[in-house]
Amino acid sequence: MATTYRKSIKSRIVQILFFLMLALMLLAVFLPLLFVLNTSFKDPVEYMLNPVGINLSALRPQNYADVLNANNLVRSMINSVIVTGFAVLCSVICTALISFAIGVLNFKGNQIIYFIAICSMFLAGEITMIPMYMLYKKLNLIGKIWSLILPSILGLPGLGIMVGSSYIRGVPKEIHEAAFIDGASVPQVFFKIDLVMLVPVLALTAVMTFQGNWGNFLWPYVTVLSNKDAHTFAITLLQFKSQNASMYGQYCAGLVIMTLPIVIVYCFCSKYFMEGMAAGSVKG
């Protein structure tokens, strides 16, 4: 009895410590977000007097309207939507087609394509930035929005291809063989069988691509800084901060506006996102 009692106490202590650690991690993640959200409703005077506290009587929602009315901010938001939309669409299409080709169509060289897709995951954007800049400069695309759209179109979604092809390989071969025996063509098998099963993986690819492109700063800063009409939301928000250094409330309001689309996309795709994260780990 004493041994069992000691084990139960130890397990409870471990659970308590575990939950305390989780609580500290949540605080470390959410406190900066709450600080930005709180600051977005303050004017400069209120921020200087009380930077951390919450004063409900001094809330200033006008900060959001001021940011949206700032010069070129709406145009830059439209540019971000266009670039991110192209990136998400092309990544989803590329993931679906290449995963189907590698997982179902056993053609020569499919493993080479798979290997290239996996290797693309380990190439940081900073490594390819200089060659890409030189290429787009020769193509006379620097300063134009196409210098932002083309990399998102031509890039390989390595994570999506890896997860998607592994997921399709786990589907029983009898399903595809039966479909081909019944007279189904390759496009029919793709659209009616595999595309439906790939929805969680495609949602994972869409969310990851959206997150990576919506807040992308370095590449737009290098390529389109000279052209105000091609600025993305992140570039315009940085310039807004440099021109209004003391307007902390308006700057934080811009950060909240920039974060909201990512939160909304994740909320709508969270179910499929979690399924996609586990899709490549379970076969059969």
Image: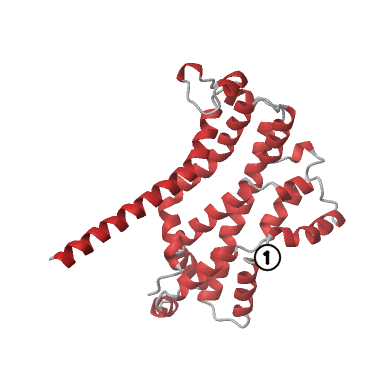
Image coordinates for residue 220, horizontal then vertical, percent: 73, 47
Tell whether 96 sits left or right of 177.
right
Report the residue marked by disc 1: 123
Image coordinates for residue 69, horizontal then vertical, percent: 65, 24
Of the 4 image quadrants, the one containing the C terminus is: bottom left
Q: Where 53 falls versus 282 (above or below)?
A: above
Residue 152 shows in the view: yes
Residue 268 shows in the view: no
Of the 4 image quadrants, the one containing the N terminus is: bottom left
Tell whether 11 sits left or right of 236.
left
User: Could you say which is closer to the camera, residue 21 or residue 121?
Assistant: 21
Q: What amino acid does circle 1 point to?
A: Leu
User: Could you say which is closer to the camera, residue 160 or residue 52?
Assistant: 52
Residue shown at 47%/16% (left/top)?
57
Image coordinates for residue 132, horizontal then vertical, percent: 78, 59
User: Could you say which is closer to the camera, residue 43 or residue 84?
Assistant: 43
Mark 1, other Cα within 10 Å: few <14 / some 14–19 / many ≥20: few
